[in-house]
Image: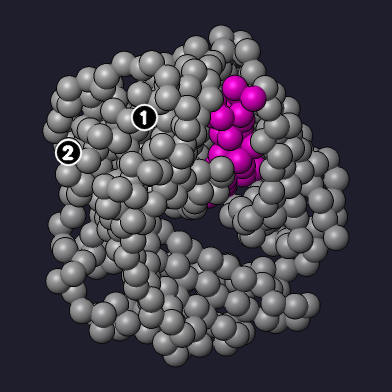
Amino acid sequence: MLPETIVRKILDLGLSRGADFAEVFVEESETSSIDLLEQKLDRINSGNAFGVGIRLLFGNESAYGYSSDVSEDALLRLTSNLAREAKAGGAPAAFHKEQVTDRHPVMIDPASVSKNERVELLRQLDGLTRQTGSVIRQVGASVAEKQRSVLIANSDGLWVEDSAHYSRLRLSAIAEDGDGPQTAMESPGVLGGYEFFQGLDLAGLANDAGQRAIRMARAGYIEGGTMPVIIGNGFGGVIFHEACGHPLETEAIRKNASPFVGKIGETVAQSVLTAIDDGTLDHRWGSLNVDDEGQPAKRTVLIENGVLKAYLADRIGARQVGVPQTGSGRRESYKFAPVSRMRNTYIDNGPHTPEEIIASVEYGLYAKKMGGGSVDPSTGEFNFAVQEGYIVRDGKIAEPVRGATLIGKGYEILPRISMVGNDLEFAAGMCGASSGWVPTTVGQPTLKVDSILVGGR
């Protein structure tokens, strides 16, 4: 992707300018997407990018620059601009070219499948969704794919090359039957090829999205207050991701911008709860072979039986906080410096059945499907909308309700999770932070929060 001689010159120059570490990140990517809206092709996009990012570390300080001009002169000039004053420095180590094992092989090359087949899939999905009910007012569907190849080399002698292919489908259904429209969405994704689309249960996805939109369109509004809340499996894990996951990244820890600073070894949740961030899960949307610093993917137990065990650490975070790297250095593209980021983050299975959890609540909310929200990572304060909700009354699921939001602080909610189900599921998402947007997976079983503020109409 870039000649070894040029890479060597960049690293030599960086160290000669006083850096104690130098890194070259080369990326080539191809993206494509097709959007169907209201039974018409709304957009067909494709693009490619190629560029180089250069990072120099000076103790705990870093300098980063990038260029799509990958000529030797341009890259050496960029390196010089990152550290202008010449200082005595060491020499880069000899390269050790690592062999990367691909845990997520592509079974059907996307390039071998015509765009017409993708369009037909979207049309079929649209039709199936409209069949779920006459009050469906709008349907949108899209496929998105990305092929990414990277080279990572640094002054420690690391030389790693890797590639990955991402495939994702999105479906939205809008229903209107009374007081305003309601939207339901499904958006599965994998680290894999076109075989993902061929294996989808289109009828199931259409039914889930269509029926959810219809139920919520016909639902009444919830009255807010503090109450027990059962959070459904799968995308319910977005709350842990946002309110607890981000504060456990060393990007927050090293800035003292997290309620979990200095709490390794302390009890932060009830013993029923174990939380994991695992980059090795086969074909999961947030998985990887190596991170964007060239470190192998790892499984990191964050919380074990209620005890905080680890942070998610990139190179700079590990250096400053004094913890091991966890293969969590990630970036959207060569235009971003890597920082510690989540991969597949989830609350693990517990000992309870969903039926036991529901039966334990006299009156409360069942947040079966979570929607979007916001969080302040420095405080853990969050506010999340419930896409599909139901009242729980006398240990049984009762009428659907809409307009619910969950409000709280992640580190305060963790100790209130008293029951964790045995029905773990995962959901694909995109996570934005200082190093851009990266694919991440969230997940959890059904769980019970004993007390949480529920906003209503």
Relative height, residue 142 to residue 438 (above, below): below
Q: Residue, x 17% and y 38% (percent of image)?
A: 5
The image quarter containing residue 268 is: top right
Return the disc, 1 or 2, that comes first in the chain's sequence: 2
From the viewer's side, name the closer residue of 294 and 168. 294
In the image, is residue 245 part of the stretch drawn in magenta? Answer: yes
> Percent x, y for residue 101?
16, 36
Q: Nearer the viewer, residue 28 or 418?
A: 28
The relative height of residue 134 versus residue 54 in the rendered view (above or below) is below
Label 2: few (<14), some or many (≥20) within 10 Å?
Answer: few
Left of 236 or right of it: where is 10?
left
Q: Which residue is mark 2?
A: 4
The range drawn in magenta is 230-255
* Residue at point 26%, 47% (across, down): 72
Judge left or right: residue 204 versus residue 2.
right
Residue highlighted by disc 1: 14
